[in-house]
Image (cartoon, grey):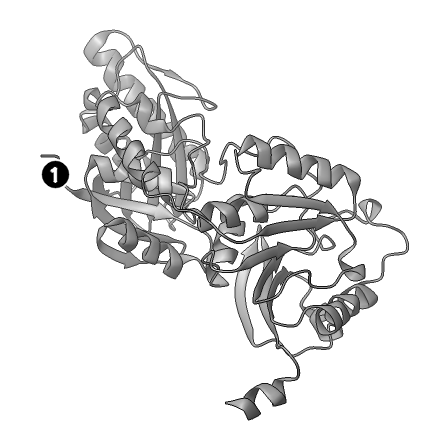
């Protein structure tokens, strides 16, 4: 039986708690939250499952060595002493990713270079040949993290960031990150138990992630591959069993997921991406201006969206007639007048603009959209007045 070992799942700021919940739900042991990461334990099969299923993880790394370092030569010597033949051969390629938070090590690029030199020299001394470096698509990606004088060496089991789900083939300006979209949905409490609307759907990322959550479809089922598939100890049979088991846990969805966008190009791109994700039977895209719509269904409605105007867009990409105050005011008016029985959530990095919505948010959650500090806000639109609701209780 495969032994458990420690792993680290990296994530976005503010998603640590929901990532920890995801890991516990999958069966991870010793789950511990950090800042932008969650540590946990599991076996090789669980590493495969974590990469395949986690919605809010960016990377899954496997620590293989920890030691203290005082300077660059100390780092070189201790990297050289490691048994790299367990992970590489001269016929393989490798790449180094380094992060440093230290007074003694100030340049991550230099740390990467010293690590690369130590590994290459070790193979040349032992075999007369050395593996080549391939920064784009290596057989092995190595992560070196130095904090003060502590150095942790890990293997990157994911490869490219796990937000690269594989289904998005067409994008609009400033598309939302897939991991960010999934995290916002989970923070909003979306569980697939009612109708869902993204009224400004862009290329359809929020809709796709919402459908995958509702149906319990593995987040990364559409990816072309993971880094661990190139490792010498990769167990193809075990991976196949893990994938089959995950797919057997999908569930039926009996509500509607709808997306609006007023731009024909966005509607076309969203439909292409949703078809590529094999989710067309669950999601409907309509060309519609949210501000001219009303709620189409009875019963509760869950709404999550990413308004298209913000600091990530160049001014040249914005209609010259666009006005932030009126735009956010229109959001509030549309919700008040047309969407009773709705929990409406949206993310914005324009914190000042929220006061023009004209509604009091019941929740504000601090998140980051790329480097921009943002808020995920919730507006509860009751059937009738809020006062009447509480009088009935």
Judging by the rendered image, the residue that carries numbered circle 1 is: 3
- Above or below, 12 relative to 116: below
Secondary structure under the numbered disc 1 in the rendered image:
loop
| Residue drawn at 72 percent across, 35 percent down | 268
Q: Position of residue 27 (x, y in %)?
A: 23, 50
Crowd band around label 1 with a 10 angstrom C-alpha radius: few (<14), some (14–19), many (20+): few
Left or right: 311, with 322 as reference point: left
Left or right: 294, with 204 as reference point: right
Left or right: 392, with 290 as reference point: left
Q: Note whether residue 203 is visible.
A: yes
| Residue drawn at 45 percent across, 30 percent down | 223
- Above or below, 43 relative to 16: above
In the image as oriented, which residue stretches furthest toward the bottom? Answer: 391
Q: Position of residue 121 (x, y in %)?
A: 28, 18
Q: Tell me where residue 134 sits by quadrant.
A: top left
In the image as oriented, which residue stretches furthest toward the left? Answer: 1
Total numbered labels placed on residues in the image: 1
Of residue 141 and residue 105, the one placed in the foreground of this image is: 141
| Residue drawn at 41 percent across, 54 percent down | 36
Q: Note whether residue 61 is visible.
A: no
Q: Looking at the figure, which quarter contains the N terminus?
A: top left
Q: Position of residue 208 (x, y in %)?
A: 55, 44
């Amino acid at each position: 039986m495969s032994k458990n070992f420690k792993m680290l799942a990296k994530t976005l700021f503010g998603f640590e708690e929901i990532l920890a919940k995801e890991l516990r739900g999958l069966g991870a042991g010793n789950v511990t939250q950090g800042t932008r990461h969650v540590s946990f334990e599991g076996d090789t099969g669980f590493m495969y499952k974590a990469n395949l299923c986690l919605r809010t993880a960016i990377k899954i790394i496997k620590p293989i060595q920890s030691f203290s370092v005082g300077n660059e030569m100390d780092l070189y010597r201790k990297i050289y002493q490691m048994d790299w033949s367990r992970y590489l051969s001269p016929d393989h390629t490798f790449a180094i990713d380094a992060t440093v938070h230290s007074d003694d090590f100030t340049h991550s690029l230099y740390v990467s270079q010293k690590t690369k030199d130590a590994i290459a020299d070790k193979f040349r001394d032992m075999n007369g040949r050395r593996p080549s470096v391939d920064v784009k698509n290596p057989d092995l990606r190595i992560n070196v993290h130095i904090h003060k004088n502590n150095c942790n060496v890990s293997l990157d089991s994911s490869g490219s960031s796990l937000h690269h789900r594989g289904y998005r083939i067409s994008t609009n300006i400033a598309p939302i990150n897939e991991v960010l979209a999934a995290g916002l949905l989970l923070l909003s409490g979306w569980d697939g138990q009612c109708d869902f609307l993204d009224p400004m759907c862009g290329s359809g990322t929020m809709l796709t992630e919402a459908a995958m959550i509702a149906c319990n479809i593995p987040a990364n089922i559409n990816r072309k591959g993971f880094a661990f598939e190139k490792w010498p100890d990769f167990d193809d049979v075990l991976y196949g069993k893990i994938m089959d088991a995950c797919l057997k846990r999908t569930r039926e969805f009996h509500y509607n997921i709808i997306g609006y966008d007023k731009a024909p190009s966005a509607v076309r791109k969203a439909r292409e991406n949703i078809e590529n994700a094999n989710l067309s039977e669950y999601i409907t895209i309509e060309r519609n201006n949210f501000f001219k719509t009303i709620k189409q269904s009875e019963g509760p409605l869950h709404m999550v969206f990413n308004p298209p105007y913000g600091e990530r867009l160049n001014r040249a990409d914005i209609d010259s007639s666009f006005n932030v105050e009126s735009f956010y005011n229109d959001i509030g008016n549309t919700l008040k007048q047309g969407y009773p029985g709705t929990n409406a959530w949206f993310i914005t990095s324009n914190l000042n603009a929220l006061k023009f919505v004209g509604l009091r948010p019941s929740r504000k959650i601090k998140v980051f959209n790329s480097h921009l500090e943002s808020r995920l806000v919730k507006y509860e639109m009751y059937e009738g007045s809020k006062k009447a609701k509480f009088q009935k209780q």
